[in-house]
Image: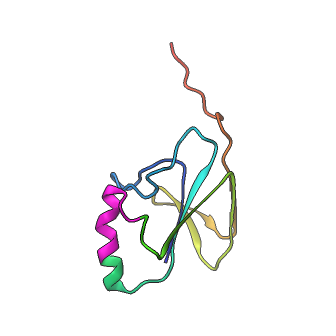
């Protein structure tokens, strides 16, 4: 139903989609929500804002530095279209540096 590749804990205005993700560990947290009924989805969704959805048996988190996704679908980043699938992404630890002036 949903596949989300996260490099941080939250998105979408504070949804804790991957509450154990870290921007600095060089790993993506890949959240997979397996098919559930609409009723079950409605019971899971509010828990996302508190990061309490993870224990659900239809939710799995996989970690990795490189992710390749193939499907008859499109990919989006922060709500913006990126490309049609397949897509391959890599987490390069410390690729962005903060420069202090």
Q: Residue at x 50, y 12 (%)?
A: 101
Q: How many numbered marks have been drawn onto this rendered protein structure?
A: 0
Considering only vertical position in the picture, is 61 above or below 100? below
Q: Is residue 23 magenta?
A: no
Is 57 situated left or right of 26 in this image?
left
Q: Is residue 49 magenta?
A: yes
* Image coordinates for residue 62, horizontal then vertical, percent: 60, 62
Is 87 situated left or right of 25 in this image?
right
* Image coordinates for residue 35, horizontal then vertical, percent: 48, 83
Considering only vertical position in the picture, is 52 above or below 92? below
Residue that sits furthest to the bottom in the current view: 37
* Image coordinates for residue 5, horizontal then vertical, percent: 56, 59
Q: Nearer the viewer, residue 40 or 14?
A: 40
Q: Residue at x 31, y 84 (%)?
A: 39
Snapshot quadrant of residue 94: top right
Q: Main secondary structure of the magenta part?
A: helix
* Image coordinates for residue 2, horizontal then vertical, percent: 49, 72
Q: Residue at x 59, y 76 (%)?
A: 73
Specify the segment rendered in magenta.
43-53
Is 1 situated left or right of 84 in this image?
left
Q: Nearer the viewer, residue 89 or 30?
A: 30
Snapshot quadrant of residue 16: bottom left
Q: Nearer the viewer, residue 13 or 28?
A: 28
Q: Residue at x 68, y 42 (%)?
A: 92
């Amino acid at each position: 139903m949903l596949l989300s590749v996260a490099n941080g804990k939250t998105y979408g205005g504070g949804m804790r989609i991957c509450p154990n993700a870290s921007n600095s560990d060089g790993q993506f947290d890949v959240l997979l929500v397996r098919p559930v009924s609409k009723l079950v989805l409605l019971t899971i969704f509010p828990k996302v804002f508190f990061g309490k959805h993870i224990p659900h048996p239809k939710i799995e988190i996989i970690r990795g530095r490189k992710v390749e996704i193939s499907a008859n679908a499109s990919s989006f980043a922060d709500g913006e279209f990126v490309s049609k699938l397949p897509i391959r992404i890599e987490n390069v630890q410390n690729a962005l540096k903060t420069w202090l002036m």
